[in-house]
Amino acid sequence: MTMALLAALAARPAGAGPWSIEPRLALETDYLSNPVLVPTQATSEEIAAAIIDVPLRYDTDDLEFKLRPNARITDHSGYSSLASSYEHLDGSVQYTRDLSSTTVQAEVARDSSLYFLGGLINRVGVARDAASTSADWTRALNERSAVELDASWTRVRYDEPADFDALVDYRYWSAGPTFSYDLSERNTLKLLGSYGVYQSLNGLTESKSESLQLGFERRLTEAWTFSANAGYSRSNNSEKVYLFGFFFLGTAKSTQDSGVYSATVTRQGEKFTFNASVSQAQQPTGFAFLSRQNAVSIGSTYIRSEYWDFALSAGWIKALTPLESLGEAAPNGRDFTQHYLDTQLTANWHWTPQWIVSMTVTKISQQYGPPTVSAASTNVALSVARQFLRTQF
């Protein structure tokens, strides 16, 4: 019924209205050597999946609205389907005036904690239910300076097995201002501040963090841009301590101090795009407190012809979490450390403007400890997609 409705909508003649829809339907088959990233006794699987993406847009001169339901449904209903199934509903509204713009975004999702770069986990992948919203307001003060205010809120719940309690359901919100000043046509100076609160939903732990950074952006050429931020962050942690789980003994407090930074270089061209970034920040990762997270990512796309295009991406994350946030004593001051690496290569053959055949090879590896445990998986996917023409109504 859904596919028939989408096909009917896509077949309608284009109109002049502000509403438009651009559905995409795909069938995919996957081979996964270790679908749940277990360190031993890995079992490979072949999975068939249907992918549905239905972006709905409303565009006028100063208002843009997007609503995007998208899902991946597999033929597996067991534990391993956590590695390949998801349901997302994304939405955004952007209102633009001569001197200001306002953007509001929201998302609800059910997916796996395992295969999302940044959602680092310990020993096992579990279902993750997430809801998030963010708002951003930017206003030009004069020809050279502008101020930006942004805020975000996230709530995450994990559907863990009864004998597994390493991950903590949490909510996290943050807000902060940014002031930017154009030194010249190519150079921009920025001052960024933020404040955030991370709370476990069971009410036992909390992290309050603040940071201040100085940023710089330079337009190197028409295609290349470089930007960097650097500063300092402090996180004040608190944990309620109970004896035998019933008798409240008090609140234990600690502090995490860390430098924070990020640097990004991007290239935008007609046939070749490239981006690379490196960063360090205090981030929520599903444990009792914020974790210090170092990340490196690289991505590029290349359009060889009207029939062929390619994409390459790689992401690496290292997260340090105090062992006391896992309910354990930290030997010799050591932290619980996680390394996560995700590399992906995709080749797309545009059989026709609407039919696309894609092959994707993905390598995912994870290492955590102490004690050190490693796991890896190689995934190969082949898909056939039908991209419907954008239809206005």
Image (spheres, rainbow, N blue to C red):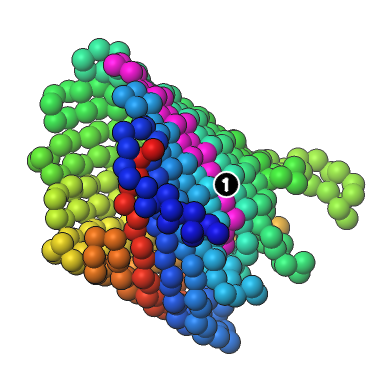
Inspect the image, locate mark 1, and give the three-letter code of the amino acid beneath it.
Val
Mark 1 closeness class: few <14, some 14–19, many ≥20 residues within 10 Å: some
Image position, residue 121 (x, y; %): 57, 62
State whether the magenta stretch is mostly helix, strand or loop: strand
Q: For the view shown, which residue lies furthest in the left direction? A: 221
Q: Nearer the viewer, residue 229 or 265?
A: 265
Q: Is residue 265 visible?
A: yes
Q: Is residue 222 magenta?
A: no
Q: Kindly identify which residue carries mark 1.
A: 108
| Residue ID at (51%, 78%) | 47
- Is residue 98 part of the magenta span, yes or no? yes
Instruction: Please identify the quarter of the rendering in which residue 359 is found.
Output: bottom left
Residue 212 lies, with reference to residue 5, above or below; the image says above
Residue at left 24%, top 60%? 353
Give the residues in magenta: 91-120
Q: Quadrant of residue 238?
A: top right
The answer to whether residue 322 is seen in the rendering is: no
Which residue is at 49% across, 44% downward? 90
Taking the spot 30% from the left edge, 16% from the top edge, the residue there is 99
> x and y percent of residue 96 in the render?
35, 23
